[in-house]
Structure formats: structure tokens, C-alpha cells
Amino acid sequence: MITTTSQQNPNGAATQLDELAAGVARLTKQVADLQQAQTERVRAGDGDDQPPLYSTVEEWVNTYLLPTFPRPVGEVAMSRWHWCEQWWRHDEAVTRLSALWYGWEQARLQMTGMLPWLRELDHQMPILYGDDGPFRNCAVSDDLGVAQHYSSPEVPAELAPENWWSWWD
């Protein structure tokens, strides 16, 4: 009959088991401490000192947004989706895309940050690409390779009368 080490020396096996349990307890505490520290860093905004993954909104749009969230441009079912290859010439588009980029850079640092960011993206995309969006008069390259860019006309506005805004002070 073959006897195992634990049968030969029950005290040695118990000691070994106690040492392993203590090691597991130490590692469990270390993991919990690291998770707590990470949570506190995120709450304190320490992720703010991380450099952006993309250095410009243009890099983010061309490298991440357009390849990750492609949209069929042109006639799609009952609506038309618009895009301008010179999107950077549309102030409204630059403002909306910059906001999405800044939000994405922050969201990527948080465990569930992408969930609210995706809701914001879902809200902004139809505005950007829609029939009334900043690209409404533009067209992407066609078979002849000709893209069309038209700046939206500025809307006229009158200046407010003198002291109109003084109630704000």
C-alpha cells in the first residue's frame, strides 16, 4: 500500500494548507486594494492626466469614427444620409465631432464610460448626417470622383440694443 505525504505527515499538510490559505488571503487583499485605488483615481479625475489616444479631432474622425461607425451615404430607404469629405470646413460639424471626440477620450478611461457615450453618438449621428444637418448641401465623390462642398449660409442676426444684457449683471 502506497501512502501519500499527507497521510505520512498530517501536520505538514495542514501547515502547507494554512500557508496557501494565508497567501490567497494576502493576494485577495492586494487585489481589493488595487481595485479601490483605481476607483478612487477615477472618482478623483486622475484619469484626466492621461494623454489623449488621438492627438486631433481629425485623426479621431478618420482613424476611429468613420471606420468604426460607417454610414451609407446617399439614398437609404426613405431618407438621405449626407457627408462632406471636407467636414472640417463646417463649423457645426467640427463642434459636434470635437465634443464627441472629447467625450470618447474620457469615456475610454472609465469601465462603463462607453455606454453613455454611445447614447450621445446615437443622438448626434442623425443630426450630422441628416437632411437638415451641416452636410445637407454637400455630396461625396461620385463615379467621376468629384466631391461637392457647399458651406451653409450664415443666418443674419441683429445686435441687441445697448444695455439689453445689463439685467444679467
Image: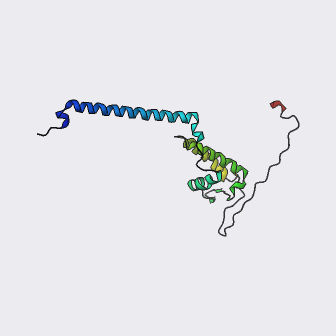
Observer-nearest of 66 and 139: 66
Determine whether, in the image, residue 70 is placed left or right of residue 146: left
Considering every residue shown, the one lying at the far bottom of the view is 144
Relative to 53, say whether 75 is above or below. Answer: below
Relative to 53, say whether 80 is above or below. Answer: below
Q: Quadrant of residue 143?
A: bottom right
Q: How many marks?
A: 0
Determine whether, in the image, residue 40 is placed left or right of residue 160: left
Residue 40 locus on image (x, y percent): 53, 33
Observer-nearest of 65 and 143: 65
Relative to 63, say whether 106 is above or below. Answer: above
Q: Residue at x 59, y 55 (%)?
A: 63
Considering every residue shown, the one lying at the far left of the view is 1
Quadrant of the drawing holding the N terminus: top left
Give the color scheme: rainbow, by chain, secondary structure or one colour.
rainbow
Q: Residue at x 58, y 36 (%)?
A: 45
Q: Residue at x 69, y 47 (%)?
A: 95
Determine whether, in the image, residue 19 is placed left or right of residue 48: left
Quadrant of the drawing holding the C terminus: top right
Residue 3 locus on image (x, y percent): 15, 38
Relative to 162, say whether 137 is above or below. Answer: below
Residue 164 locus on image (x, y percent): 85, 35
Residue 24 locus on image (x, y percent): 35, 34
Q: Quadrant of residue 103?
A: top right
Considering every residue shown, the one lying at the far right of the view is 162
